Image: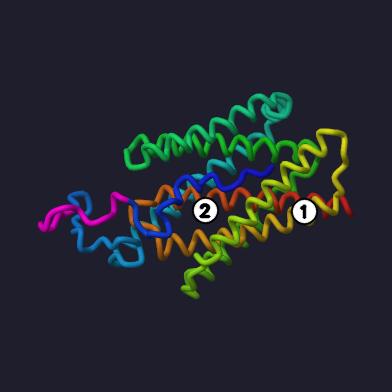
Amino acid sequence: MFRGKMSSLFETDKQGGASSSSLEKPGAVLEIDESSGLSDFEYGVNVATSVHSVRLGFLRKVYGILSVQLLLTVIISTLFMVIQPLQNFVLHAPWFTMLAIFSSFGFLIGLFCVKDRYPLNMQLLFGFTLCESISVGTICAAYAKAGLGFIVIEALFITLLVFSGLTLYCFVSKKDFSFLGGFLYAALMSLVVGSLFMLVFSGFGGKVSPLLGFAFSVIGSLVFCGYILFDTSMIIKHFSPDQYIEAAIALYLDLINLFLYILQILSYLQDRN
């Protein structure tokens, strides 16, 4: 199931490196952040130009939120896979999954509107993650129903291994992969068009070649590997310190999409055997 980069709602200010809330405040008087004890001079226009404590705090927030999102997704997916009545419900109630998909868009749009209003932003983030987890969990339940639950576990470990490796490479090499943005966006749009074409083709009785589906999944996984490099670079070098929610959502969607494509690849290889 192709979910796309819904986090693009938050990416309008990335190239500039700062959101409006992180720009210099009016007046010449030095202001102090009462919650952290840090002055405006210690916050740069982006994370890269901020002091070490600000950078470290930002990364802790981003990867802390991401960890909770992944944990929730794993828990819900596991419940859908192992609890038989729950599995039967989600597999025989497509309206429930569709409701979750459309609701995730609603939560994301709402989060875009109130992204700086705590705790409402965190509540909307939880709703978004819950809906995404239901969507992913339904797919995992279908694999478990077909006796392919082990593929889901394999896909999870491969995804985490790839994500960890790419993230570590970004941090160690300190390379800026933001130049990939235009290429990745074009590739993403091609994936969207291709997905819609195959969906319509199948809907009219056509049969999509398994080999074509495999090639499509390989390309999709490579695109989202690129997005992991791109988004991690943006987080390290271009995001402002208050964009931790946007950063976590970007990485979460990268991981989810990569997982789904790897799942399709493993499924194809299993069918070949």
> Where residue 153 appears, x then y in whole percent?
69, 50
Local secondary structure at mark 1 = helix
Q: Any magenta on residue 28?
A: yes
Image color mode: rainbow
Q: Is residue 258 above or below residue 101?
A: below
Query: Which residue type does callout 2 highlight?
Result: Leu
Which of the two labelled residues, at mark 2 and mark 1, occupies the earlier sequence position?
Answer: 2
* Residue 15 found in image quarter: bottom left
Magenta span: chief secondary structure: loop
Q: Nearer the viewer, residue 24 or 40?
A: 24
Q: Nearer the viewer, residue 189 or 2?
A: 189
* Residue at point 70%, 30% (across, down): 87
Q: Which residue is mark 1?
A: 266
Q: Nearer the viewer, residue 253 or 140?
A: 253
Q: Is residue 93 above or below residue 106?
A: above
> Where residue 131 appears, x then y in whole percent?
55, 34
Q: In the picture provided, is 266 more to the left or to the right than 36?
A: right
Q: Which residue is mark 2?
A: 251
The nearer-to-camera label among 2 and 1 is: 2
Q: Nearer the viewer, residue 199 or 37?
A: 199
> Where residue 93 appears, x then y in whole percent?
69, 24
The quarter of the rendered structure image containing the N terminus is top right
Residues shaded magenta: 20-32
Query: Which residue type does callout 1 highlight?
Result: Leu
The quarter of the rendered structure image containing the C terminus is bottom right
Q: Any magenta on residue 264?
A: no
* Residue at point 18%, 56% (across, down): 37
* Residue at point 12%, 54% (across, down): 27
